[in-house]
Amino acid sequence: MGVLDMFTENLVTRLRLIVYAVLVFFSFFIFVGVAVLKDKWFGQCILYFDGGYIAPPVSNCNYPMAIAIMLQLIYTLFRIVSLLLLVLGKFTPEMFLFSNILELVYVLIDIAATILTFIGACILSAGYNAAKKYIGDAALSAVNVAQAGSWISTFLWLFVAAIGVVYMLRSGKLPFMRSGGAAGTTNTGPTASNAPPPDTLPNYDPPKY
């Protein structure tokens, strides 16, 4: 429990702020790198190109860009603003933005972002390996930047998701971790700890003859 005790609300908030800010920085690596790659090939996606006459689907490039923009830029900027206002005292922990249910939603989004960014990184890496002899020097740096941004972002998402899970476990904010009776049971009757003491029976001495 010594390690878990380190994850105070103050520390977790600041760690999240730092990681989200770094995620915003690396989001530009992904969507700018992929955009430059597409621009070098006149709007087409060279990933997975095998030298044939049919161009690979442009969705191979659009997917990593969409994930980087929606989750890694827009969502993280929202989180940075809300957490920064909390640190500055403009927001309070009692607000709905920081309620237990939304805290769980944030952690689930972080986990989903980890998986989706990992998929995007795999698409970029596998697509590059399949078409690296056709990409050329002009777009090589762009695809390498996009790959680096995707893999670094994957580990950053994993880190911030792990922080959220550990913090919720420590603070008891998970619904199934709340204290009380077993799930599905209700202890309404008196127990050994809260039952009133039994009445003391009177002690009648037998008559002496």
Image: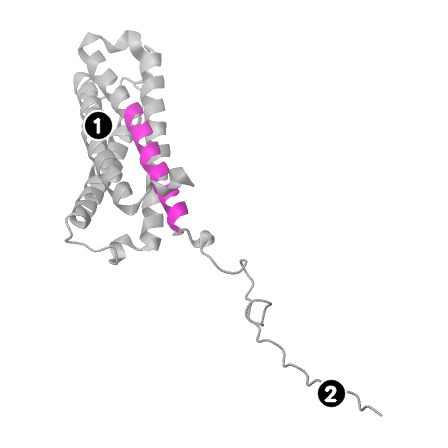
| Amino acid type at mark 1 | Phe
For discs 2 and 1, the disc positioned in front in the rendered view: 2
| Point 30% across, 55% down: residue | 99
Residue sitting farthest toward the right: 209
The foreground one among 195 and 110 is: 195
**Residue stretch in magenta:** 151-171
Quarter the N terminus occupies: top left
What secondary structure prevails in the magenta region? Answer: helix
Horizontally, is 207 left or right of 23 in the view?
right
Quarter the C terminus occupies: bottom right
Q: In this figure, which residue is indicated by the disc labeled 1?
A: 26
Q: Residue 61's x, y, as percent? A: 27, 25
| Amino acid type at mark 2 | Tyr
The foreground one among 1 and 25 is: 1
Q: Is residue 165 magenta?
A: yes
Q: Residue 189's x, y, as percent? A: 58, 72
